[in-house]
Image (cartoon, rainbow, N blue to C red):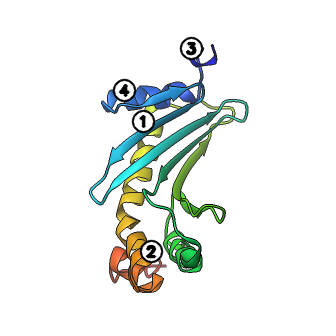
Amino acid sequence: AEGTTSNAIMDPLVEFLREAGLEFDQKDSAVRLLVNGKNGKLSFFGHALEASEQLLLYSICPVNALEPKFSEMAEYITRANYGLSIGNFEMDYGDGEIRYKTSIDVEGDRLVPNQVKQLVLQNFSTMDRYLPGIMKVLYSDVSPADAIQEVEGQQNPTDDC
């Protein structure tokens, strides 16, 4: 079975999740788990692309945007993405799924659990940080700009440039 062979991309992810004491389901080159954040429960999905030597990690929002809110949510995640140095938000215009992605390409190199740890923690914490703003945009009349300002505070990360 593919899941029992050594996978240079998947093995460090599995090792980190085990060391962190997280319960997860693994099937072949993918893992799934639930994560309790400060602001909500997130689904997490990790996928190892062994052939292209890439690891993709996703935190998935617990609710999907409904079509009437797609435009506002697209604005919110665009505003959120603008100041992020690692990863990005995405929204599926088919079903409204909102997720945060971190990834790494290790072609010609070796992935180690500490690299995975940083990507996973960045992934969890960013989705959890922006989740209250997502909920405000989806379920109230708060504008995307105001929701981002509440999440990020008054400081603009590019003010120092």
Residue 58, horizontal then vertical, whole percent:
52, 49
Is residue 16 shown above or below 61?
above
Q: Nearer the viewer, residue 140 or 28?
A: 140
Disc 4 on helix, strand or loop? Answer: helix
Is residue 100 shown above or below 159?
above
Q: CA distance from mark 3 to mark 4?
A: 16 Å
Task: Tell me the crowding category of disc 3: few under 14, some 14 to 19, or many 20 or more residues within 10 angstroms, Cα based.
Answer: few
Where is the N terminus found, in terms of image quarters? top right
58 with respect to 132 (left or right): right
**Comes first in the chain, label 3 or label 2:** 3
Q: Are marks 1 and 3 in contact (CB under 8 Å)?
A: no
Q: Three-letter amino acid code at disc 4?
A: Arg
Q: Nearer the viewer, residue 112 or 160?
A: 112
- Circle 3 is placed at which residue position? 4
- Circle 2 is placed at which residue position? 138
**Comes first in the chain, label 1 or label 3:** 3
Q: CA distance from mark 1 to mark 3?
A: 22 Å
Q: Three-letter amino acid code at disc 1?
A: Asn
**Comes first in the chain, label 2 or label 1:** 1
Q: CA distance from mark 2 to mark 1?
A: 35 Å
Label 1 or label 3, whichever lies nearer to me, is 3
Residue 33, horizontal then vertical, whole percent:
42, 38
Q: CA distance from mark 3 to mark 2?
A: 42 Å
Disc 2 on helix, strand or loop? Answer: helix
* Number of the label disc, if any, that sits on residue 114: 1
- Circle 4 is placed at which residue position? 18
